[in-house]
Image: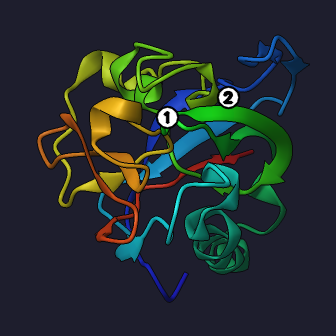
Amino acid sequence: DGIYNKTWIIAGFDMEHNRTASDGTVYDNGYGICLIPKNSLGNYKWGNDTIKGYNGSTTHTSTLPAVANNLKKVLGDHLVLRNVLLSSARDSSWCASAYTWTTAYCTLMSMGQVTGTFASNSNKYDDGEANYKLPLFNYERWNFDAEVWLRGFPGNGGGNFYNVYFLTTSGDPSYDRCDTYKGLLPLIYIR
């Protein structure tokens, strides 16, 4: 694409066809191929706070749309604009407390998409529509070239309302302040 120039790997096939999201809604982003970059697309802040959930994060509102615009130069209409269910609020326990349906070309993965354990970040609001494990992670434990952001919040266990989950380079979950810099490993869907 002239900007990121990364190798992307297949993480699953048809994972968002006729699925049920965490809110019980059946959604269908069609048949397609889930791809994630083999290496981080760079270091970015998740955002400046977590009060509006992942939906209100800088990552979702500006960083990933910029990534999508560059990918569309190469992928064109093959890059799928997906229906996604993203956390949209945080409660006094620092947990996601609501979600909203929106659309996105690129999203951060949920913890469960990598580990297979859902509502484990804090609750179902962290998972949204990303409540399926990517098959890639059934066969290998991923080693990342950088610590990479995820969607969810650790809640009270995370020490403060600024904290967001990320994966370490060895693929283990951890958390850090949303205003620090971590790698970007978005999920895209193509067909």
Comparing 75 with 66, the one in front is 66
- Residue 26, given in percent of the width and then of the height, sits at 88, 15
Residue depicted at 34% across the width and 21% down the height: 115
Neighbours of disc 1 within 10 Å: few (<14), some (14-19), many (20+): many
The residue at which mark 2 appears reads as 128
- Residue 15, given in percent of the width and then of the height, sits at 65, 23
Residue depicted at 40% across the width and 62% down the height: 178
Q: Quadrant of residue 71?
A: bottom right
> The disc labelled 1 sits on which kind of residue?
Ser
Circle 1 SS class: loop
Q: Quadrant of residue 154?
A: top left
- Label whose residue precedes the other's in the sequence (2 or 1): 1
Comparing 163 with 74, the one in front is 163
Residue depicted at 54% across the width and 55% down the height: 50
Circle 2 SS class: loop
* Res 81 visible: no
- Residue 171, given in percent of the width and then of the height, sits at 20, 37
Looking at the image, residue 177 lies above or below residue 134 = below
For marks 2 and 1, give the CA distance: 8 Å
Comparing 30 with 23, the one in front is 23
Q: Is residue 7 left or right of residue 53?
A: left
Q: Quadrant of the C terminus?
A: top right
> The disc labelled 2 sits on which kind of residue?
Gly
The residue at which mark 1 appears reads as 110
Q: Is residue 25 left or right of residue 31?
A: right
* Res 15 visible: yes
* Residue located farthest toward the left when viewing the structure as drawn: 170
Residue depicted at 49% across the width and 33% down the height: 93
